[in-house]
Image (cartoon, rainbow, N blue to C red):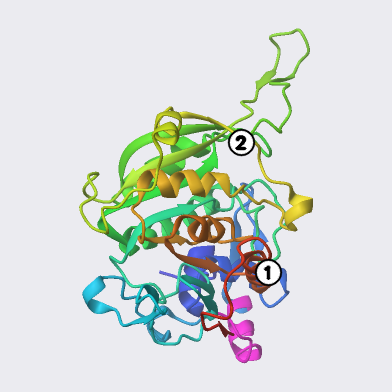
Amino acid sequence: MGVRSMFTTKDAAKHIGVSQSTIYRMEKRGLISSIRTAGGQRRFSIESIKKYLEKNQNFEVPKNPNKYKKLTHLVKEQEVNYVTDNNKQPLTPKIPSSDELFFQADSIWIYNADILPTESIEENSIDLIVTSPPYGVGIKYNSHDDTMAYHDYLSFTKGWLAKCYKFLKDDGRFCLNIPLDKNKGGQQSVCADITTLAKQAGFKYHSTIIWNEQNISRRTAWGSWLSAAAPYVIAPVEVIVVLYKRSWKKTSGSRKSDITRKEFMEWTNGVWNFMGESKKRVGHPAPFPVELPRRCIKLFSFVGDTVLDPFLGSGSTLLACLQTGRKGIGVEIDRKYCELAKKRLFTEGHINQLKLAVVEG
């Protein structure tokens, strides 16, 4: 057998000791080069990998997960030492520092990290995950290649889904905001494919919520006008796939709910109607409105539970945590978006700086 000369993105990442998303960033910065197959998939030559290893050893990329300094989030009552206010109410768990910790105040943590290799989140510690991951539709993020081939996108998705499964408690839930499908660059059944990958990762399926954003085009038919030659049907909605780890009935936590009767009746209807968020107002290419995580948090978690967003973006999930009395953890690979999320916590979330310590990276 001859010596292997070309590597897939996954194999190249494994060989260097980084995540696949880091390989995309390295390529974007010219640190490593690839060629494309007829199907549009990346292939990295052994020469390109050797050149990187020889000449770019000082480039700071996420290291092999085994080399990460571990931070443990202790969320069980008996395992936490709390800072308290004058009324002896628990405010913030005292936790070890982490090289990835970007910001901490009140019951909120932001980590500037890649969700795939990070070990800053303890396994079996999260009550609810609410997130809107990259869609693979060409959105111009600062630190993520959203134009990767669909096969690579699904491989990336499979990896972070498996990581999130480990983070959840046995009765933990997962609210995943994704598109129903996509048409740019070829039709793909995004929701069906990601749901299948989630079940393969171990998640159990509960339901799907249809989110009518109301602020996207009312026109739902494209292609050949008044002809059956090549019409395109586009549904102007997104979905929130509701999954869970092992048991749907939640037995851990405070058992205290803050949802009103009106909210419960309205939100258990699987079609949600509220506006999307303005990119210009927030300063992020794909923000979701605080209303989305707020509903998910109040409907699927108890007061005081720990909520994680592994793709924090502009910080909407953490704002919703502040509004609802939950502990919030956000992981975001791009430092500028970490800054944006932190800014929103102060300007929109009104974190009390006098009462609580702030740790910044």
Q: Please name the residue that numbered disc 2 is placed on.
A: 182
Say left or right for 223 vs 131: right
Q: Secondary structure at mark 2?
A: loop
Q: Where, by quadrant of the figure, is residue 214 drawn?
A: top right
Asked whether residue 113 appears in the rendered view, the answer is no
x and y, in percent, of residue 330 in the image: 51, 66
Write the start and end of the magenta stretch as one range: 48-62
Q: Quadrant of the C terminus?
A: bottom right
User: Real-space Cα distance between discs 2 and 1?
Assistant: 32 Å
Q: Nearer the viewer, mark 2 or mark 1?
A: 1
Q: Secondary structure at mark 1?
A: helix
Instruction: Answer whether residue 52 is magenta in the image.
Output: yes
Please tell me which residue is depicted at 72% across the width and 53% down the height of the picture. 285
Please tell me which residue is depicted at 54% across the width and 53% down the height of the picture. 133
Amino acid identity at mark 1: Lys
Q: Establish if 223 lies above or below 188.
A: above
Foreground: 234 or 330? Answer: 330
x and y, in percent, of residue 58 in the image: 62, 92
Q: Where, by quadrant of the figure, is residue 61 drawn?
A: bottom right
What label does residue 343 carry, if any? 1
Q: Establish if 224 lies above or below 154.
A: above
Mark before the other along the chain sequence, 2 or 1: 2
Q: Quadrant of the N terminus?
A: bottom left
Foreground: 32 or 107? Answer: 107
Q: Residues within 10 Å of mark 2 (few under 14, many from 20)?
A: some
x and y, in percent, of residue 168 in the image: 32, 60
Amino acid identity at mark 2: Lys
